[in-house]
Amino acid sequence: MSDTRTEKFDFMSLRKPFAAISVLLVIASIVLLGMRGLNFGLDFTGGTSVELEYAEAPELDDVRSGLTEAGYDGFVVQNFGSDTLVLIRMQEAGDDELGPRILADVQERSDTEVELVSSEFVGSQVGDELKENSGLGMLLALAVVLIYVGMRFQFKFGIASVIPLAHDVIIVLGVFALFQWTFDLTVLAALLAVIGYSLNDTIVIMDRIRENFRKLRIDDPEETVNLSIHETINRTINTSLTTLLVLMALYFLGGEAINNFALTLAIGVIVGTYSSIYVSANLLVALGVTRSDMVVPPKEGVAGEGEEDEEPPEWLNRM
C-alpha cells in the first residue's frame, strides 16, 4: 500500500524561499520605520480633542471642509459613539478658548444646531510616556510568551513561537510606515490582539507537531512537521477566513473610530496565518527539533526504554 503522506503538498519543500521572503519583509519594514517612521496620532503626540453634538447627523466631509475653510489643519474628524456625536482632534495646542472657537466656526458653516460636549488637551509628555510604555508592554508580552511556551513545550518551541510574533508585529508596523496610516491607541490595542491571535494559531500547530513526534515513529522532522500542518491546515484557514469576514464588516460598517483597529487586525491575521506555517514550523526544522526532544523522561521506578519490563501478574498468565 502506498504511503498517503507522500501525496500531500510538501510545505517544508518551500521553507527556504519563504524564509528568504520573511527576512526581506522584516528588513524592508525596519528600513521603512527608520526612514519614514510612524505617523503617530494625537494619543502619542499630544493635541486637542473637541467633542461636538449635532441636532441631526452631519456629513463628516462637510465638517472637514468647514474646518479647512476656517483655517484649521492637521485635524481628524470622526463619529464618536453615534452619528450625531463628532470628535475633532488636532495637534494645535489647546487653551480654554479653542473649544468654543471651533464650535463657533463649525456652527457658522452648519445648517443644524451644534453643542460643545467637551474640550480636552493632551500634553506631549503624556504621549512620550505612552510610546515608552507601549513598547515595553509589547516586549514584556513577547518575554512572557517565550517563558510560557518554553515551559509548556520545549525551549526550541519557545524560540519558534516568539520570533514569528516579533516578525508579525514588525511587518504590520512596516505597512503603517509605508502608507503613513495614523498610529494611535486603537492600533496599539490591535497589535497586542495580533500577538494573541498569532500565538493561538502557532500553539495549535506546535501542539500537533509535539503529539506526532511522540506518537509516530518518523525519523525525518520535516515529514512530521508536514503531516502536522496538513492535520491543522483546515482549522487554520477556516479560523482566519471567519475572522477576516468579521474584521471586514467592522472596517466597512463600524465607522471611522475603529477603522484602523479593524485594518490592523486584518493585516495581522493574514501575516500571522502565514507565519504560523512558514515561520514557526520553519524555525523548528532549522533549530533541529527531533523525536528525542519530545521524549518524556521515565518516572522513577517505571521501566524505561531499553529496560526489561516487570513480569506480568500471575492471574494474567492464566487467562
Image: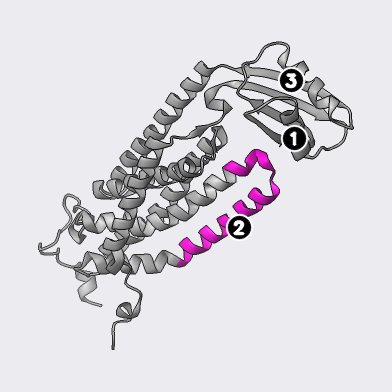
Give the magenta range.
Answer: 234-260
Mark toward the viewer: 1 or 2: 1
Tell me the residue at 16%/52% (across/down): 301
Q: Position of residue 235 (x, y in %)?
A: 48, 63
Q: Position of residue 36 (x, y in %)?
A: 43, 36
Mark toward the viewer: 2 or 3: 3
User: Can you tell which quarter of the image residue 62 is in?
Assistant: top right
**Main secondary structure found in the magenta portion:** helix
Tell me the residue at 15%/58% (across/down): 304
The amino acid pointed to by label 1 is: Ser
Mark toward the viewer: 1 or 3: 1
Q: Name the image quarter holding the N terminus.
A: bottom left
| Mark with earlier residue (1, 3) | 1
Residue 65 is labelled as: 1
Mark 2 crowdedness (10 Å alpha carbons): few <14, some 14-19, many ≥20: few
Label 1: which secondary element: helix
The amino acid pointed to by label 3 is: Ser
Q: Which residue is mark 2?
A: 245
Tell me the residue at 81%/28% (across/down): 53
Q: Which residue is mark 3?
A: 118
Q: Is residue 109 left or right of residue 10?
A: right
Farthest-out residue, bottom: 1
Residue 250 is covered by the magenta coloring: yes
Q: CA distance from mark 2 to mark 3?
A: 35 Å
The amino acid pointed to by label 2 is: Leu
